[in-house]
Amino acid sequence: MSAAIQARSASNQDLLIFPCNGNALEALDCLGAAFRCIGFVDDTPAKQGARVGGLPVLGRAALLEHPQALVLAVPGGPASFRSRLQLIAGLDIDPRRLATVIHPSARISPLATIGRNVLIMAGVVVTSNAVIDDHVCVLPNTVIHHDAHIGEGCLIGSNVTVAGGVALGRNSYVGSGSSLKNGIEIGAGALVGLGSNVLHRVPPGATVAGNPARSLQQ
């Protein structure tokens, strides 16, 4: 059974979300009946003890105090995406506790493969033979076409088109409104800027933007 099917068949499991950021707040709208969020876990002392969205912001001790709770870890953004896998590993929890959360309106092909600790938001479509590795976050209304491979730790913005056969390297970032031409490769740790039209391979660690997308000096 795929992680996607497991997430959808679960019922009202306790869930902690790390950290308390924009991705975490949007994740609340994706839970449906599968999960019951009992709080956020955040390393920032100024946030701890507050309530956000009606839920408490807790320290890492909550991971030990609630051993039966599953965990959704969604750190990172455009400025920090390359460090997100290290942040997730630093939680030092059993990988079996990591939850995959899929909005009820998302359409996931039964032929697709979805990993652990994946967040898929409203209106996302994942078609036949697409593979989404662990620790991936996909924002609303993105389409991931057949045979695409989304590497571990990637962040994909909203309204992105990932055409068939695209290979997105681990820990890369694709800005909202972008389109990736069929069959191209986006290298590990690369950043694709907002609204880009990517027609050619992007080297690892590169930053590209524009229509057509071109390399930007960093």
Image (cartoon, helix red, strand yellow):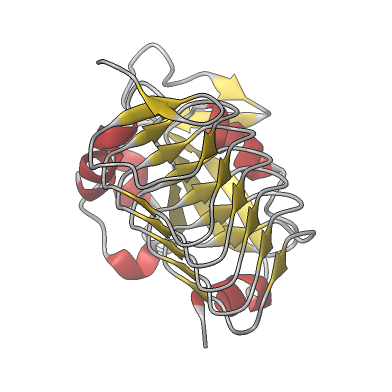
| In the image, residue 100 above or below residue 114 | above
Total numbered circles: 0
Q: Residue furthest bottom?
A: 1
Give the quarter of the figure containing the C terminus: top left
- The x and y percentages for residue 94 are 26, 64
Say left or right for 128 vs 215: right
* Residue shown at the point (41%, 38%) measured from the top left: 173
* Rendered residue at 79%/59% (across/down): 105
**Placement of 31 over or under 5, stated as above or below:** above
* Side of 77 relative to 204 (left or right): right
Residue 194 drawn above or below residue 73: above
What x and y, as percent, mark residue 118?
A: 48, 57
Q: Residue pushed farthest top?
A: 46
Looking at the picture, how far across and down is residue 141, in whole percent?
73, 47
- Tell which of 193 and 114 is nearer to you: 193
Query: In the displayed structure, would residue 86 be above or below residue 22?
Result: below
- The residue drawn where x is 74% and y is 62% is 33
Q: Relative to 46, is 4 on the left or the right?
A: right
Compare residues 140 and 201 and report the one nearer the observer.
Answer: 201
Point 48% across, 67% down: residue: 165
The x, y position of residue 130, in whole percent, is 53, 72
